[in-house]
Amino acid sequence: LAWAELLKLALNEEGPFGDHLKYQYRLVQERAELRSALQQVMRGQLPDEAILHRLNKAGLVKGSGQSYTLRCELYERYFKMKGW
């Protein structure tokens, strides 16, 4: 795919990252503590350290110390699209 076309398809659940995005969404949607912590990170807040560690191990966030963000813009855009 051309880069422009890939960008158009990236957030589509039937697109090239669809299965992965749906898996990550289900992972946090089914666990209230993970969902809440991910939403905190998206707002620039720092959740509980143990929960933050779980999000980091799942590959959803990156950072250290007092600064964490979602691992990539694709996750940020996808979760925002889902209403988070």
Image: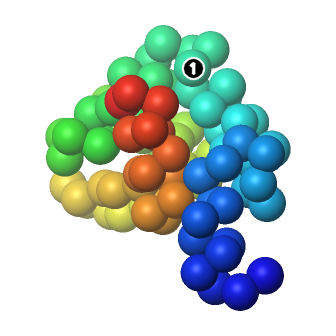
The residue beneath circle 1 is 29
Q: In the displayed orientation, state which residue is furthest to the bottom.
A: 2
Tell me which residue sits at (60%, 52%) in the image.
11
On the question of residue 50 being in view, the answer is no
On the image, the x and y values in percent for residue 57 come to 61, 49
Q: Is residue 41 above or below residue 68?
A: above
On the question of residue 3 being in view, the answer is yes
Tell me which residue sits at (74%, 36%) in the image.
23
Residue toward you, 67 or 36? 36
Which quadrant would the N terminus be assigned to in this image? bottom right
Tell me which residue sits at (61%, 32%) in the image.
25
Residue toward you, 1 or 75? 1
Count of numbered circles in the view:
1
On the image, the x and y values in percent for residue 40 come to 27, 33
Residue toward you, 80 or 41? 80
- Counting other residues with Cα less than 10 Å from the Cα at mark 1, is it few (<14), some (14-19), or many (20 or more)? some
User: Tag 1, which secondary structure?
Assistant: helix
On the image, the x and y values in percent for residue 78 come to 50, 45
Applied colour scheme: rainbow
Tell me which residue sits at (66%, 75%) in the image.
5
Q: Quadrant of residue 84?
A: top left
Give amino acid for label 1: Gln
Q: Quadrant of residue 83?
A: top left
Q: Is residue 76 above or below residue 3?
A: above
Residue toward you, 39 or 53? 39
Q: Is residue 25 left or right of residue 34?
A: right
